[in-house]
Image: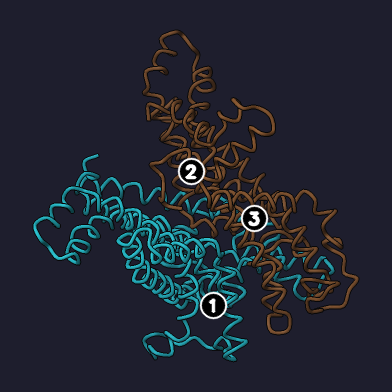
Amino acid sequence: MANRADLALRMTRDAGIEPARAVGGARGVLHALGRFAVRQPLGAIGGLIVLVLVATAIFAPQLAPHGAKDTAFTQYLPPSIEFPMGTDQIGRDVLSRVIWGARLSLYVGLVSVAFGITLGALWGVITAYFGGLADGASQRVVDVLMALPPIILALSLMAALGQSVNNVILALAILLTPTAARTLRSVALSIKETPYVEAARAAGCSHWRIIFRHLLPNSFATYIVLFTVNISYAIVVEAALSFLGLGVPPDEPSWGGMLTAGTQAMETAPWMVFFPGLAISLTVFGLNLLGDAIRDLTDPRLRGGLG
Amino acid sequence: MRKYVERRLLLFVPTLLGASILIFVLMRLVPGDIAEILVYQTGTESSTIQQKQIQQIREELGLNRPVIVQYLSWLGNALRGDFGYSYTQRRPVTDILKERFPRSMELAFLTIFVAIIWAIPLGVISAVRQNTWADYLVRVISISGLSLPIFFTGVLILYGLVRFFRWLPPLEFVSFLDDPVENLKQLIFPTLAQAYYISAPITRLTRSQMLEVIRHDYVRTARAKGLAERAVVYRHALANSLLPVVTFIGWWGGRLLGGVVIMEIIFAVPGMGTALVQAVNYRDYPTVQAIIFVMALVFLTINLLVDVLYGWLDPRIRYA
């Protein structure tokens, strides 16, 4: 643990960032990506899937033939050339909703993880540094938040907040914060004992300077791992909440919500189940592969662990 | 060992109390209360008579008292096994719990049981034959299991059953005590759907643990003294690989309970999960509170048991 900085260095080297800088230019970037693909072939496949997902989310207005909420078509049309994924129970184009769904999923996943993990990281690192009563009390709060099974906590938060996209983000962020706080706290505790932090204290650095210049930057590798691993988790929980009818409002194009509607019309319109389900599975698959690869690069000790 | 268990027990009660406060406060934040819902069911126009009715119901339920008083009286009753009255199901919440709790627990235990008897041998095979086709096959199965969200697996299985076998979710739940065969028939599909998901990480973890342990000196010694390969793998390597698997199962207890809720909804099993989602939709908070409280209790108990078991299995932990 003493070598967090060293670890970060190795991570950038393993990820092929250094050679890229050495060669420079577009060729250097390609070279680095090639190295990554050779070292982590599965990670590269995951990266490709994620790239397609991100492109779909960004270019949804150009890619989707119709709006996500356009209802101007016949209900329950099977897949055809005009509607490659058919239409749903109120005559919306399923393909368009799957495409807009990519944007919704990614938006909810990224924003909630960014909020939740960052808040948790600050919380964990600061309480670890000061220790004492505040640390003990904050650990008990974490205990309480982690006493409820995750989906159940999300579900009760949604019941209290009411259904909307922003509330789903808030609920997911609250769900992710305690885990991040606990993980980053343990990392910060070990960094706190290292000689360079002691040296910084001896040199007269203020508490906040030590936190922001030493503890936070040196726990960055863990932060990145938590970030990538939890995006797919957040996307699945959003879909699960919407599947249970407690996530985003039903007219929003959530893959989970589409799956619920499909389940109710399963026998007449199985395409309403397959395509959104496939979209979620592919997304999670890609993110898992990429997350595994990033975890392998940053910390070999976690390899093949709990994923 | 006793000190270790005592310390863990000491944390158990405050955490459970904290969770109950959290649940209570969340339920008070819900927009619109049960009184409004009960009254507005009959008509949408708000009138003075309805306002009076709402006031009356609130008084009956004690909703107009300060939150802290409400909480303490709820807690006092809960400790005596009285969780209030469910207005939507028109019976005491305790009756709902008594009826639903065993069903959900049965589903959870079946899932974990099936997942373990399927996942651990797969993990062992995968490790013993590292980098052969058998290993690759197991790894593909487990990574796909991790990527398919349980609600999609569940819906796919349901679709297969309905489409090809004309299967329909049973209208009435049969208890294991009344008719074990019929009961297992009802629970087998949700069990398999979730076990597929839960078994994936267990397989991966068993594999990576086995790979690590197999390289230890004592395994080489066991081989060198001429033990049969089977004895080496099972008695020496596997026994020492299972420790992290035990904690892992505890760690995923929460996901297991969440998964049970989803499986119950998909396969129409009348357990705690279906009751919970229904109660949330009707803002029947005595029921929601009680069910979430029981789930927190179960989850914390699983974690406690796993920690104690872990300390018992590995003496190094106790003295840490």
- Of the numbered discs in the image, which one, if any, rests on residue B91? 1
Q: Residues within 10 Å of mark 1 (few under 14, many from 20)?
A: few
In the image, are marks 2 and 1 on the same chain?
no
**Which quarter of the figure is the N terminus of chain A placed in?**
top left
For label 2, the residue is A295
In the image, are marks 3 and 2 on the same chain?
yes
Which chain contains the residue that carries disc 2?
A: A
Residue A147 rendering spot, x and y as whole percentages = 45, 53
> Would you say residue B290 is visible in this rendering?
no
Q: Residues within 10 Å of mark 2 (few under 14, many from 20)?
A: many
Which chain contains the residue that carries disc 3?
A: A
Q: CA distance from mark 3 to mark 2?
A: 35 Å
Residue at 19% x, 49% y is B2
Which chain did the renderer colour brown? A
For label 3, the residue is A160
Which chain did the renderer colour cyan? B
